[in-house]
Image (cartoon, rainbow, N blue to C red):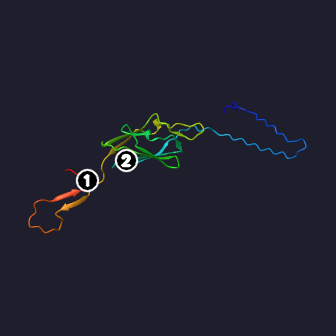
Amino acid sequence: SQFFQQGANVISVMVFNVALTSSDLVFDMEMDVFQPDQIPPQILSITPQPGRVDSLSEITIVFNEPVQGVDRQDLMLNEFPATDLVAEDDRRTYRFLMPSSATSSAVVKWDPDHGITDLSPTPNAFDVSQSGAPYIYRIQDLTPPKLSSIHPTPGTTLSQLQRITVMFNEPVSG
């Protein structure tokens, strides 16, 4: 863009033979013109979707185009950065491993000082304000407890029943 002016431009080419008597002149010129990409990368999908979830140990982000400069610290859960980052070869899919949360709600947001850009010759920065963040999750155990043991074993013949012990695979109340 620094070589061309707005409007009409003239390109001049001068070709010389090695010798005046030579007839083996070959000339091959190519000129490519492209419009610069000025569209920043956007999020195509988030898994799990914000809302009610059973757990939030990882979040997978898929961008609409390949990006660079993604770090684990770029995505935060309740102000704590992700503990690890797994990037796919397509440079569009990133799996953030999240710190465990002791609360029933989680706010996930991007670090405003991230370094995420697309791969354009003039890179476009990921615009956090267009990302839909913060993402709000309600962590709720949606898996019912399972019976792990009963004592005495059902079907056992007893002369007297004083106590029944019921064990579950996780703490229960009520």
Can residue 132 be seen in the rendering of this structure? no
Q: What is the residue that sits farthest to the left in this orientation?
A: 160
- In the rendered view, does 54 fall on the left or right side of 91? left
What percent of the width, then of the height, locates residue 143?
Answer: 30, 53
Question: Which residue is at a point 55% across and 38% down the rendered structure image?
Answer: 39
In the rendered image of this protein, does residue 28 appear above or below residue 8? below
Residue 165 sits in quarter: bottom left
Q: Dot 2 lies on which element?
A: loop
Neighbour tally class for label 1: few under 14, some 14-19, many 20 plus, Cα within 10 Å: few
Q: Which of the image's four quarters has the N terminus?
A: top right
What percent of the width, then of the height, locates residue 131?
Answer: 46, 39
Kind of residue at badge 1: Glu
In the rendered image of this protein, does residue 45 appear above or below residue 40? below
Comparing 124 with 23, the one in front is 23
What percent of the width, then of the height, locates residue 149?
Answer: 22, 60
What percent of the width, then of the height, locates residue 172?
Answer: 22, 51
Neighbour tally class for label 2: few under 14, some 14-19, many 20 plus, Cα within 10 Å: few
Question: Which residue is at a point 15% across and 68% down the rendered structure image?
Answer: 156
Residue denoted by label 1 = 170
Q: What is the residue that sits farthest to the right in this orientation?
A: 21
Q: Are marks 2 and 1 in contact (CB under 8 Å)?
A: no
- In the rendered view, does 10 fall on the left or right side of 71? right
Residue denoted by label 2 = 57
Question: Which residue is at a point 19% across and 58% down the rendered structure image?
Answer: 166
Q: Dot 1 lies on which element?
A: loop
N-terminal-most mark, 2 or 1? 2
Q: How many marks?
A: 2
Can residue 147 be seen in the rendering of this structure? yes
Could you give the CA–CA distance between mark 2 and mark 1, rounded to whole angstroms? Answer: 18 Å
Kind of residue at badge 2: Ser
